[in-house]
Structures are given as C-alpha cells and as structure tokens.
Amino acid sequence: MLKKRIIAVVIVKDDIVVQSIGFRKYLPIGKPEITLEFLTSWGIDEIVYLDISATKNQKLPNYEMIRRAAKKCYVPLTVGGGIRRMDQVHELMSAGADKVSLNQIAWSEISFVKEVALAYGNQCVVASVDVLKTSNGYKVYDYTKKQATGMDPTDYAKKLADYGAGEIFINSVDRDGTYLGYDLDLIQSVTNSVHIPVICCGGARNAADMVQVFSKTNVSAAAAANFFHFTEHSVNVSKSIVYKNENIRLETHANYSENTFDSDMRLTKKDDKILEEMLFLRIEKETI
C-alpha cells in the first residue's frame, strides 16, 4: 500500500511567498528559497511551488529564482505558473523541477498535457484544478477571469487523466485561507472519478484536518499552504499527529512521537523535569 503524502504548497506572487485568502487577499511571508529550505529540513514529503502572478501578468516563469530555490529543496518539487510552451517546461526541469503543474494552459489547450506527458512521463504532469461551489454545484474556476466556468470538476478531472495527467491537484477556492477544513464532498467526488492520485488543497487548519481527509476520502495526498508557515517545525508536528492514524513517511529526528497536543493540535509543554534532562542530550544535525 502506497504511503499517504503531506505536501506543502508555496504560493508565490511577484517573487514573494504569500499567504492566500480566498484567491483575493495576499499577505507577504518571505523569500521562496528560505521557505523551501525550512520545509525540507522539517521533513515535508513534497513541495508544490505555484507562481500565481506569472500567467496573469503574461510573464515567463522566474527560472533563476526557481533554480535558487531548488538548490534548497531535497524532496520532489512541482513547479507551476506561467507555463505556455514546451521550451518553458524544458527550462523548468533544467532549473530543478521534478514535475510541472499545469492549470491555465491545460484549460485552454488540453493537448499540451499529453505533449508534456509524452516528453517526460505521466508522473511529471500535475493537472491543477481550482473549484468553486456555486448554486449549480461544483464548477471549475478560472482564476485569471475570477469566475466559475460551466465545467463539472469530475468531468474535467477525467478528461485531464485521459490526456495523460499523472496526478490531479484539486484546490477549493471557497476554503482557501478559511481554516474550515477540506471540502470532503468535493474531494471524494473527484477521487471517485479518476484512477490517478489526487492531491487535495484548501481549508486545512491543522493536522486534524489531514487525519480527517485521509480517513473520509480516498485522496492520496493532503496539501496545505498557510498553516505550515507560521509555526516552527510545523511539518514535523503535523506528521507526528497524522502518523498515529495513517501510513506516512516519518524520518526526522524531531518526530514528536512522545509529545501531547492541545485541541488546536499545538504542542503542550513537557514536564519541567523532562525538559531539564533534555538540556544535556546531544542531537546530531540531520541531512534529509
């Protein structure tokens, strides 16, 4: 049985990592290369790097920035944003990407999905689908036009899989930045419609939401952006909680397996005597 994955989404706007709220409001966080370095050292399984300003502003992907960031990343790296041609895919792969995320280009020219899959293999193609819940049900969302299309996301996901996508990245616009938890109905409907792995994103508040989405749906990976950025060792702590319920990778020294957590999934303080003993423990720096 394949292990479930925990994926960090790094949203980049105008070359700065940002916190996204509802696809409308963006708060600055910091430099991409520093973000990737921390997430990697904390034991994340994969990273999805999405430049949300490239396509909208008709800009090329920032290859130099991705090259710098990739040097700090030792886990599979998916890069998306601004991709319109095969030479750009070649350049991104050369810069350090392991996979590419296709959103707008897949929507406007779905044959491009097949073209990339034939060149690099299905496993290198992540088809990104933004979804908005409307009065007529779930619909694919066009973030450049800021409006829902008439396409059902399950039909679109099946089409993307038929054209060679190796994974579907499903992102709930309604839940983005809300901390309301994943949209389980949406995720289950998409996982039921395709035979390829599905990554879910949008709404995660903490590790409890990841435990829930793994137990309630057939999703292959749970992704989150915002909550990983604001707590030290956020990945290690989240994975230690998910590990108690799911088969995931947990290989860092700091695995928090003996810690307890409060209702918000934050670490509780250890006993003073234990903390005093820990002062004399030597912990080697690890390389993941």
Image (cartoon, rainbow, N blue to C red):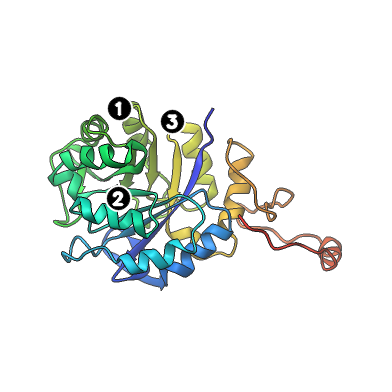
The answer to whether any part of residue 21 appears in the image is yes
Pointer 3 or 1: first along the chain: 1
Residue under the point 70% across and 48% down: 257
Q: Secondary structure at mark 3?
A: loop
Which badge, 2 or 1, is on the more N-terminal residue? 2
Residue 174 lies, in percent from the top left, at 30, 50
The circle on residue 218 is 3
Amino acid type for the residue under numbered disc 3: Asn
Relative vertical location of residue 113 with respect to residue 80 in this rendering, above or below: above
Query: How far apart, in angstroms, are the residues tagged by discs 3 and 2?
Result: 21 Å
Q: Amino acid at mark 1?
A: Ser
Classify mark 1: helix, strand or loop: helix
Residue of label 2: 174
| Closer to the eye: label 3 or 2 | 3
Q: Dot 2 surroundings within 10 Å: few (below 14), some, or many (20 or more)? A: many
Residue at which label 1 appears: 193
Q: Secondary structure at mark 2?
A: loop
Please state which of residues 165 and 225 is positioned toward the viewer in this rendering.
165
Residue nearest the viewer, comparing 136 with 113: 113
Q: Earlier in the sequence, mark 3 or mark 2?
A: 2
Badge 3 vs badge 1, beta-carbon distance below 8 Å = no
Q: Residue sitting at 45 percent across and 41 percent down?
A: 221
Density class for disc 3 (Cα within 10 Å; few <14, some 14-19, many ≥20) is: some
- Residue 230, image x, y percentages: 51, 66
Q: Quadrant of the N terminus?
A: top right
